[in-house]
Image (cartoon, rainbow, N blue to C red):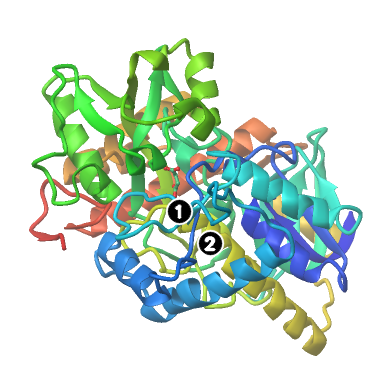
Amino acid sequence: MEQTDVLIIGGGLAGVMTALTLADSKKVTIVTKRSQKEGNSWKAQGGIAAALREDDSPNRHIDDTRKAGCNRNDLAMLHILAHEGKSRLQKWMNEGLHFDVTEQGELDLGREGAHSCHRVAHAGGDRTGKEMMRFFIEKLKGKVSFHTHWTVVQLMIEEGRCYGALFLNEKGELTLVKATHTVLATGGIGGLFTHTSNDSHICGDGLAVAARAGATLTDLEFIQFHPTLIYGEGSSCGLASEALRGEGASLVNQLGEHIMVNAHPLGDLAPRDIVARVMYKQIGVGNRLFLNISGIHSFHTKFPQVVQLCELANIDWTKGNIPVFPGPHFHMGGVETDEYGRTSLAQLYAVGEVACTRVHGANRLASNSLLESLVFGERAGEAILQESREQTSHFPFSDESIVSHFYNDSWEAPAKEEIQKRVDKALGIVRNESTLRSFIDWAHYFFPVHFHKKGSFMSKEQVETAHMLITATLIAKAALRNDVSCGAHFREDSKEVIDL
Ligand code: SIN
């Protein structure tokens, strides 16, 4: 058992920003499922969007975000993201956070899908996430405790209040961390699918524990498919950033036809949901798809991460065509939060992709996620500081009650691959009532999930499988309930389509 002031579950950018805000005055413990350097933030390529140029403005950034999000965005939250985002980012830049500059020494801002101007700051070419994480992690050095290779099992909730969480530690032993405040920063759900741009271990743990704890989840059906996952050796081997299309790359099929030319006024830079659906149709008629990069000058210096991914997959990018397919990338839905990351449960916060701030609406604008992590990660830290001045915490569970809380019979688990295969079918780019119902019917056979059988707890693998099943079922139910197609949620049996 361990005691801390603030427990942060997840070590990506959002959790790190919350930790940084608190580290000088609170005992902060960060728990990660894998090593400190794994997770989606480290992989982020394109960059971070903010209205940093003279001829841009936060209001223009808001307009673009709303168009991409089909106007489902929460305007007040979006105002915070665009306006505060710009100033918070500038503050960090003044403190040494570095982005790539042109030969003239000006910020070298890139362009991505659905942005009306160049607005995306990047670092190390397409290594933005890695550079930002290095910068912020360095600032945390010696100030917080880290536990790596721990899997979250359950939040400790009593009368609508969170008191920490239970984990399986690196040895697979059950470990309790008591905390005055708990922050979910576990990332998204890409690992629910067979192929994803995400790290495969990111598969909805945060949503599952939040749901079991009774937190409100929202907009779960909105899952963004990124158009250009690199296809190598039968599977996805990482992302080819949308910034490539911002630099002039184009989506073509095996016949050399430019598939986006007549599909949308923005062509290759149309919003991701639209591009993904055009690709889905192309694949449906048996076409193979490529990102033609032949027009990009100095490709290997601008996009070193994409070059490395291609080389690892034996793809000869020098020939000008990278094989690609659309794959699950980002979850717009999540644990509902207010403007300070507060969830519906007291002393439980959520930041980053696991949270649903509603800034993204039905389809996230490219490169808004690092900005969201920075802004709402810091805001959560600020709110916790404020709240902890007003509150003290006691721990209402006896050791005995913790164990009996989990006592149950054994649980029969499906194989992880089986869940993924069924999720691919039910929750893909195009959905319908029948595939959603058959997923839910199949999953029901495995409920209720029993996390503990007499004498022993589940293994980490079993907990992960259970969380996948819970999260996927919640998403499928949300997708079934909503038969209106909007943004990234597309029902082919839709009675109504909201497509702006
Ligand atoms: C990309 O580089 O294309 C991904 C960036 C993002 O998801 O916003």
Q: Going 8% across and 58% down the picture, which residue do you hit?
A: 495
Res. 350 in view: no
Residue 81 location (% of width, % of height): 48, 72
Q: Is residue 54 left or right of residue 494?
A: right
Q: Going 40% across and 15% down the picture, which residue do you hit?
A: 318
What amino acid is at disc 1?
Ser
Q: Does label 1 point to a residue whose CB lies under 8 Å from ligand 1?
A: yes
Residue under label 2: 371
Label 2 sits on a secondary structure element that is: helix
Identify the image quadrant of the N terminus. Answer: bottom right
Mark 2 Cα within 10 Å, few/some/many (few <14, many 20+)? many
Label 1 sits on a secondary structure element that is: loop
Residue 389 location (% of width, % of height): 81, 86
Residue under label 1: 367
Q: Quadrant of residue 147?
A: top right
Mark 1 Cα within 10 Å, few/some/many (few <14, many 20+)? many
Q: Is residue 91 above or below residue 284?
A: below
Whether the residues at callouts 2 and 1 have beta carbons within 8 Å, the answer is yes
